[in-house]
Amino acid sequence: MSVNINHHVPEVQAYRASVLHFTADPAFHENAYSWHEDGLLIVKDGHIVAAGDYQHLKDKLPHDVMPLDYRGKIIMPGFIDTHVHYPQTDMIASPSPGLLPWLEKYTFPTERKFEDRAHAAQVADFFLDQLLSCGTTSAMVYCTVHQESVHAFFHESTKRNLRMAAGKVLMDRNCPEFLRDTAEGGVRESEELIERWHNKGRQMYAITPRFAPTSTDAQLQLAGELAQKYPDVYLQTHVAENTDEVAWVKSLFPEARSYLDVYDKYGMLRPRSMYGHCIYLDDSDRKRMAETKSAVSVCPTSNMFLGSGLFNFSRADELHVPLSLATDVGGGTSFSMLQTMNAAYKMARLGSTYLPALRMFYMATLGGARSMQLEGTIGNFVKGAEADFIILDPQATPLLERRTGHSESLEELLFALAMLGDDRSINATYAAGVKVYQR
Ligand code: GUN
Ligand code: ZN
């Protein structure tokens, strides 16, 4: 695996394969996607020029440009993982009877190591290579309470020229002393990081209160004010993941109508606010999320691994809550968004709903971009978008080859990839027009 740190790209490149991308949510629109069986993607200076039929577009290519031949494979936008913890890479697959003991036993000791910049850089490097090998080109990333963990992450992301949002965890109570900041100190450090990193190249900052139990009212108040001061900065946190956590929040914030209402009171519901899990919401909460354009990061492998519960897709859709998919590693058990779709499908079935593959691929691409207010920048192949894309291989394993060899529709083909696929199905990953991973 090699990292291309040369960001200079020759003028025009073209790629021939089947091409798939979304222009709307298939749950609500008939013509939500474009599929070109023999397709062509044209890229110039790291941006999309055109995506369409090979026969139609080939004459538009400059004479000296030969398309790279990926026939038999599928080009689609890179995946967007809207909730993941890079410092938890080394503690993935750590067993525990539920969220709160898992945080105490594994998470906090693991995150302590990120006070060391060299350790943080080494983990960030590995983490980003994992994402790219799984076809994930953008993510909403939690760092640790240490400022250095954020610098390390953005340095590694900048090296690869990836569009990433990340932030320093805010946590000033109910956690070990060694991970505790203060209300004022944490928010001051966050503002310094915004000034240093937000919109520097493709890097974007996310204000990151870990979750309500680990912040005082004073810290939540200041975090909310910071979010109001910087409306184009992200905010990310956890909400309503686990019944013990929900009960804890109720005891800590007895005046709040609901867990989500704690964040609402502090002005944290807004566009670019991303809420992990959202399992134990009620319809009033869902309405507030929809009307404030706050987005859900659905984390199915994590929810099933920690036994947290089942996300309710049908209520969320009924009330038009923006949805995206996320791994939540290390609570999640895979960096692969294909494996995450596999789990999402099963989670939906256990809740008596049905998620078509097209919907899941939408959620992992354009749905993520829309949740992050980045439509037109990433998530699909509209003209001018940044050229983050992947080459999916439906024949990556003998079983996939056998199954996809007789799929009778695009839905069937994508469904097989979602159930049977993982990092092996990612042949190559491109960021801003540059190949950053080759299997
Ligand atoms: N709630 C608070 N912190 C965390 C975390 O690190 N992972 C998960 N899954 N839930 C959390
Ligand atoms: Zn999480």
Image (cartoon, grey):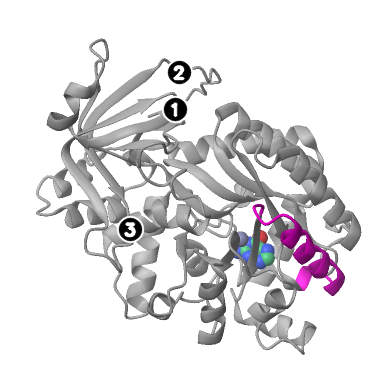
Q: Which mark is residue 9?
A: 2
Q: Is residue 414 left or right of residue 11?
A: left
Note whether 329 is above or below 399 in the view shown. below
Marks 1/3: CA–CA distance: 23 Å
- Say what secondary structure mark 1 lies in: loop
Identify whether 286 is placed above or below 418: below
Picture coordinates of residue 284, whole percent (x, y): 55, 86
| Magenta residues (range) | 213-233
Determine whether the beta carbon of the residue marked 3 sits less than 8 angstroms from the nearest atom of ligand 2.
no
* Amino acid type, residue under disc 1 in the picture: Gly
Q: Residues within 10 Å of mark 3 (few under 14, many from 20)?
A: some
Q: Residue at x 32, y 74 (%)?
A: 349
- Asked if residue 401 lies in the magenta stretch, the reply is no
Point out which mark residue 46 bears: 1
Indicate the position of residue 110 as horizontal and vertical percent values: 72, 51
Secondary structure of the residue carrying tag 3 is loop
In the rendered structure, find residue 31 and report the number of the disc placed on it: none
- Determine the secondary structure under disc 2: loop
Ligand 2 sits in quadrant: bottom right
Q: Are the residues at dot 2 and dot 1 in contact (C-beta closer than 8 Å)? A: yes
Q: Is residue 280 visible?
A: no
Tell me which secondary structure the magenta stretch mostly adopts: helix
Residue visible at 75% across and 45% down?
194
Circle 3 residue: 24
Position of 175 with respect to 286 (left or right) is right
Instruction: Judge the density around disc 1: few (<14), some (14-19), many (≥20) Cα neighbours within 10 Å.
Output: many
Q: Is residue 297 above or below residue 50?
A: below
Which picture quadrant has residue 347? bottom left
The image position of residue 165, as x and y in percent, is 61, 47
**Please, what is the three-letter code of the amino acid marked with disc 3?**
Ala
Where residue 42 sits in the image (x, y, percent)? Answer: 30, 28
Which quadrant would residue 38 be assigned to in this image?
top left
